Amino acid sequence: KCIVVNNGVDTDEFNPAYVDRKLRANFNIPKDKIIIGTAGRVVPRKNFKLFISLGIEICKKHKKDCVFVLVGDTPYYFNQSLMLELKNMVKDADLDDKFVFTGYTERVESYISDFDIFFIPSMYEDPFPRVVVEAMSLGKPVLGYNIGGIGEAIDNKINGYSFALEDESVADSLLELIEKEELRLKMSYEARKKALNCYDSRIIATKIIDNLKLLFS
């Protein structure tokens, strides 16, 4: 006898109309560049190597003039060299000008708000990653795997793309969004709408209160 109440997000705080956008200005990214971004703690289970690999493939094989941005860093207590590995992948591919590693920031929304596409590469059963809902609230099409809470949040081909773990069409879907501005804008609208209707913190708070009342009624 379980009732699921999802994590919520303040959709006013994560409102693309009011967030102070800083990514392009801070890292000198031209306005005409499509930004594909991701965010989170840089640890192995988040699968950021896939994000880097896809970026290299799209820039090298498909010759798309995009910028790939990773927002986040490895917490000091993890004692890992993953960030260095990711940067070396980019360096070995001679694509330093196509990737941005921002490091940690307290105001993640100021960077995500400048993304055109959000990709979460996790392939483990992350219960309900808050960053997905934050990106949706900021009006970003979200791409990710249909596992855990990620697949629950993404409505495939409506507000983003949801992939089976064995699916090898991720790059194709990214390319489609890169090339089709109208599709990006449509999915952006749908992402923001779902965040407002399903994940706004006031809606979530009401659900919690209503369920507590049921327990004691």
Image (cartoon, rainbow, N blue to C red):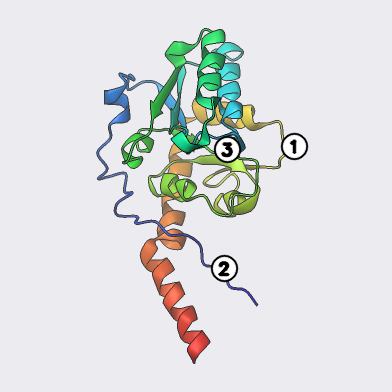
62 w.r.t. 127: above or below: above
Residue underneath mark 3? 46
The number of numbered discs placed on residues in the rendered structure image is 3
Q: Earlier in the sequence, mark 3 or mark 2?
A: 2
Instruction: Where is residue 65? Give x, y as percent.
Output: 47, 15
The Cα atoms of the two marked residues, 3 and 2, are separated by 24 Å
Q: Residues within 10 Å of mark 1 (few under 14, many from 20)?
A: few
The Cα atoms of the two marked residues, 2 and 1, are separated by 27 Å
Q: Nearer the viewer, residue 201 or 104?
A: 104
Left or right: where does residue 210 sit relative to residue 85? Answer: left
Residue underneath mark 2? 4
Q: Secondary structure under badge 3?
A: helix
Give the residue at x 43% y 59%.
8
Residue 188 position by quadrant: top left
Q: Earlier in the sequence, mark 1 or mark 3?
A: 3
Tell whether label 3 touches label 1 (CB within 8 Å): no
Q: Earlier in the sequence, mark 2 or mark 1?
A: 2
Instruction: Where is residue 12? Give x, y as percent.
Output: 29, 54
Residue underneath mark 1? 166
Q: Is residue 188 visible?
A: yes
